Image: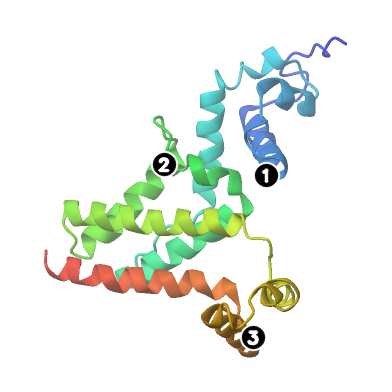
Amino acid sequence: MKEPRHVGADAGLSKQRVVAEAVRLADSEGVDGLSMRRLAGVLGAGAMSLYHYVASKDELLDAMIDIVFEEIELPPLEVDWQSAMRREAISTQKVLARHPWAISLMESRTSPGPANLRHREAVTACLRRAGFSPLTATHANWLLNSYVYGYALQASSLPFDTADQLADMTEDVYLPQLPPDEFPYLNESATALLAAGYDPTEEFVFGLDVVLAALEPLRAST
């Protein structure tokens, strides 16, 4: 079956609409299956008409990642550096939870868009104003990104979404596999977490605060 032939303007297309629809597709289906033909079909346009707005799939991915960076809160200027980077990191984690396909692409773009560059400039400026040298600011930024992206990747693959779901799985699935005579410490941990009403969503902030505290001596020593 031939694809419908539409001129971009007649189909109501724009670069903004093309990129926004690509993000929606990636959010629902993942980025691996995203193609210009698939995107054109969703937009009701001919595949070739999309190249009027994005010259290649790489350019499309650059624009999609720029939308993701646009959603991330920049480190605010009116607070100390740890509070500023804490807010930026928490915002990044929330954005990546909405767009898990983006995790592996955040650092891969060689033609970053304006929002991407604004974000990187703001983060670097926050760290430099706090007293980090250019080298230690790079170390700090690299470590924070590794933590945030690593956490986001791990969270996206967990078999539960809420503390209640984890509690049910621990009681019904995990504990029966952990007889105390064979796995005493794992059984003890699972039992204690159940009793405490453990919420795994708190792990991100716990680890983030440890990382930020560990970076403070680097700032003081520069």
Q: As rendered, which of 217 and 76 lies closer to the eye?
A: 217
Residue that label 2 marks: 107
Q: Mark 1 is on which residue type?
A: Asp
**Residue 75 lies in what quarter of the image?**
bottom left
Q: Is residue 9 left or right of residue 108?
A: right
Which label number is shown at residue 177? none
Q: Residue at x 32, y 52 (%)?
A: 142
Residue that label 1 marks: 27
Q: Relative to 56, is 203 above or below?
A: below
Q: Earlier in the sequence, mark 1 or mark 3?
A: 1
Inspect this view and state whether residue 73 appears.
no
Q: Is residue 13 left or right of residue 54?
A: right
Give SS at disc 1: helix
Q: CA distance from mark 1 to mark 2?
A: 18 Å
Verify CB contact (< 8 Å) between mark 3 and mark 2.
no
Q: Earlier in the sequence, mark 3 or mark 2?
A: 2
- Report the label total: 3
Which label number is shown at residue 197? 3
Name the residue furthest right. Answer: 1
Residue 192 horizontal/vertical position (percent): 59, 87
Q: CA distance from mark 3 to mark 2?
A: 36 Å
